[in-house]
Image (cartoon, rainbow, N blue to C red):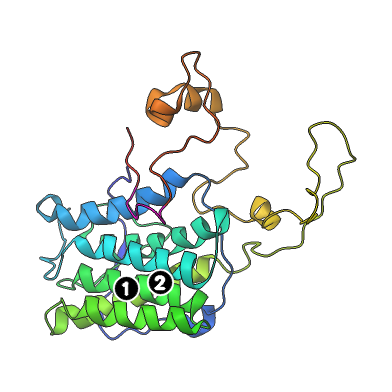
């Protein structure tokens, strides 16, 4: 769980403009594990659902329905999987971007958890619900706005979601702050290695990958291997993978009696099926 953090700047001007123009078309990045990605969405929902536990200095935050998180998870799944036709790790990559922006947009106002690579709090009294809508919409529109189906889906979801928040200063401030949160995420992903050139030079040998006949298709999105992660700060070599794999909360029922992990097992299912954040068992 993200720890509370107090040394952050507060946005004082409700009309502060974002920097989407400078970051449109920014690169993407890879979440190392599906649970990390889902954890950002879960934390954002928790920050909305548990406002009485917020840190000192947080706003009263009118317009704070946690259902906005699952609504925009569903919108993101439809946009990424259906409209853009993304799949596998590439799809989860973009889901991670949207959830990271929403996480910052919500927690910058509720101040329940530390922000993700940002230090700007939202204006007091802003609506975190409106902020979540604006953040998710801006990230998804930046990456998939060239697709007519995605534009239509996002426009409809945006109008529907904002209609649930009462008009007024809190809504306007929330939208502006959410846009800033999205711009920050987009800025972080510039030059992160997405779509970078890769080569596979290992000589043929048992167990070494080769294109499968008859299509002889190349690797699926091989650039994911060298894309800068959202959360990990190393290549993983220094991590204690033995302890990770031995933790029953990590794999749960996916383990065989001898402790090995069953092939094809996963946690939480596909977002295209459930649309729900994964929970740690």
Query: In which quadrant of the rendered image does the C terminus lie?
Result: top left
Q: CA distance from mark 1 to mark 2?
A: 6 Å
The residue depicted at 21 percent of the width and 69 percent of the height is 129
What residue is shown at x 49% (from left), y 49% (from top)?
231
Q: Is residue 39 above or below residue 90?
A: above
Residue 71 relative to residue 221: left or right: left
By secondary structure, the bulk of the magenta-drawn segment is best described as loop
Identify the residue under disc 2: 182
Magenta residue span: 271-277
Residue at 11% across, 70% down: 62
Helix, strand or loop at label 1? It is helix
Mark 1 vs 2: CB contact within 8 A: yes
Image location of residue 228, percent across then percent down: 60, 55
**Identity of the residue drawn at 51% across and 54% down:** 230
| Residue 109 is covered by the magenta coloring | no
Residue 178, numbered label: 1
């Amino acid at each position: 769980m993200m720890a509370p953090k107090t040394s952050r700047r507060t946005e004082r001007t409700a009309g502060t403009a974002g920097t989407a123009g400078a970051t449109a078309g920014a690169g993407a990045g890879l979440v190392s594990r599906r649970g990390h990605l889902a954890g950002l969405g879960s934390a954002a929902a928790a920050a909305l659902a548990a406002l009485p536990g917020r840190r000192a200095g947080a706003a009263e935050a009118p317009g704070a329905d946690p259902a906005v998180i699952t609504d925009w998870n569903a919108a993101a799944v439809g946009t990424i999987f259906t409209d853009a036709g993304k799949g596998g790790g590439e799809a989860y990559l973009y889901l991670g971007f949207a959830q990271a922006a929403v996480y910052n947009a919500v927690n910058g106002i509720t101040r329940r958890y530390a922000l993700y690579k940002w230090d700007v709090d939202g204006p007091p009294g802003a609506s975190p619900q409106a902020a979540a809508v604006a953040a998710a919409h801006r990230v998804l529109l930046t990456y998939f706005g060239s697709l007519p189906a995605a534009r239509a889906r996002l426009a409809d979801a945006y109008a529907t979601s904002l209609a649930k928040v009462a008009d007024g200063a809190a809504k306007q401030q929330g939208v502006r702050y959410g846009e800033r949160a999205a711009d920050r995420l987009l800025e972080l992903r510039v030059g992160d290695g997405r779509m970078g050139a890769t080569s596979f030079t290992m000589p043929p040998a048992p167990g070494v990958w080769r294109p499968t006949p008859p299509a002889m298709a190349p690797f699926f999105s091989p650039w994911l291997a060298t894309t800068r992660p959202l959360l990990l700060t190393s290549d993983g070599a220094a991590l204690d993978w033995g302890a990770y794999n031995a933790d029953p909360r990590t794999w749960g029922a996916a383990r065989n009696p001898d402790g090995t992990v069953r092939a094809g097992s996963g946690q939480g299912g596909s977002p295209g099926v459930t649309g729900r954040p994964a929970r740690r068992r």
